[in-house]
Image (cartoon, rainbow, N blue to C red):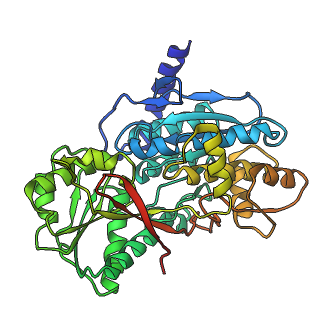
Amino acid sequence: MRKISAALTFSIATLAIGFLVGACGDNSTPNGTVNTGNTATPAANSTTTSSDKGLKIGSLLPTTGDLASVGQQMLGSVPLLVDTVNACGGVNGEPVTLVQVDDQTDPRAGAAGMTKLATLDKVAGVVGSFASSVSSAAVSIATPNKVMLVSPGSTSPVFTEKAQKGDYKGFWARTAPPDTYQALALAQLARKKGFKRVSTVVINNDYGVGFEKAFVQTFEKLGGTIVNKDKPVRYDPKAQTFDTEAAAAFAGKPDAVLAVLYAETGSLFLKAAYQQGVTKGVQILLTDGVKSPTFPEQVGKDGDKFILTGAIGTVPGSNGKALEAFTKLWKDKKGGAPGEYAPQAWDAAALLTLAAQAAKENTGVGIASKIREVADGTGTEVTDVCEGLKLLKDGKKINYQGASGNVDVDANGDVVGVYDVWTVGDDGKIKVIDKVTPQ
């Protein structure tokens, strides 16, 4: 029955997205899997925990594809949150059910997964996605189906613009700040380090182009020059060779090159640039899309030296009041420390459960109506999700302080955060060397 159900689910989801996301521009259909620890199932299928009653939420995160190395780091947060909530009584008197789907870092697969979650699983809220292009496809399905979508990492400024126009009707939020803030932080960092002439190369999707636009505007306002402004280098997300793009991005003798990439394709680009010899004497500036422990190894070595040694970048950091407790819980349950965006994923799931309890109903409409109130309200400050649920059950108001930050969600679904500055050492390990708050 499991295989039959999976096939039927995929067929229905595929038919649905033929009408909804025909313009996503991605013709590939990779056979990814969902990794939930001990089992692997088809990407269109899912892992469901808990009971048939009560609040049902989903996760739509990249276990496979171009962002798998980052996605794997946040994958455990949502089930950890659900287990924690269920251990202290659940939401509205019932256990929370979780359905996990792999979006494959692919808009079509993400749309199929969101269609399944909304129409077949009938979830009230979803944590996802990570890639902005996937979230764009998913939110177009979540909104008409009245499912609250909270992304832990889609940072494109496009979401702010569309929210301002009312496109999402309140069914969108994120716990990572938009790239307008990260671009500002990185532009300020570049000028602080004395870089006057910078070129850009970006992945040609919402994330890359949105970041590029924000960085160019900010860097120029700070007195810098964008060397290739009239001929921006934007690479195809499905590309496998990058010799032409590498030569173009490093032309004109820039002081630094801003590279807004995803890990799998980004490693190929940087390797191609190094092999051409164009990276010599040029500072590489990177962003959150490639911040994973395995990325320097993906790019590779020249003899004993890592190609990426000395590269610097930014990534949304975590400085929330709940971070210490979350880190301890992660260590106790999973060992080690939580990876990039794990705190943001935890907070996204926490907001879904708290908002449902505040609304006293397990629906997307209920969650959407209360999510800002529990995130940035006038109630009692809480860092513990169980404490927050208890206060809400007693009819009191709360102001949730998360692990990633204060998660004060505004009218556009945005939050403002702090950024870690990171670099790649001689040993190929990524080290956080500073924090910066955009001003």
Q: Position of residue 59 (x, y in %)?
A: 56, 40
Examine the rendering and report whether any part of residue 125 can be seen: no
Query: Of residues 265 and 37, which is closer to you in this image?
Result: 37
What residue do we see at 49% from left, 46% from top? 138
Residue at 31% x, 52% y: name it: 427
For image coordinates 65% across by 41% down, the residue present is 332
Q: Is residue 388 above or below residue 99?
A: below
Q: How many marks?
A: 0
| Residue farthest to the top, as pictured | 1
When the figure is inspected, residue 223 is found, relative to residue 144, above or below; the finding is: below
- Furthest toward the left, the residue is 276
Query: Where's residue 102, x and y in %?
Result: 47, 35
Quadrant of the snapshot with the N terminus: top right
Depth order, front residue of 189/388: 189
> Percent from the top left, x then y, of residue 192?
35, 81
- 311 left or right of 21 in image: left
For residue 215, say whether it is visible. Answer: yes
Residue 213 location, quadrant: bottom left
- Viewer-side residue, 25 vs 302: 302
Viewer-proximal residue, 45 or 435? 435
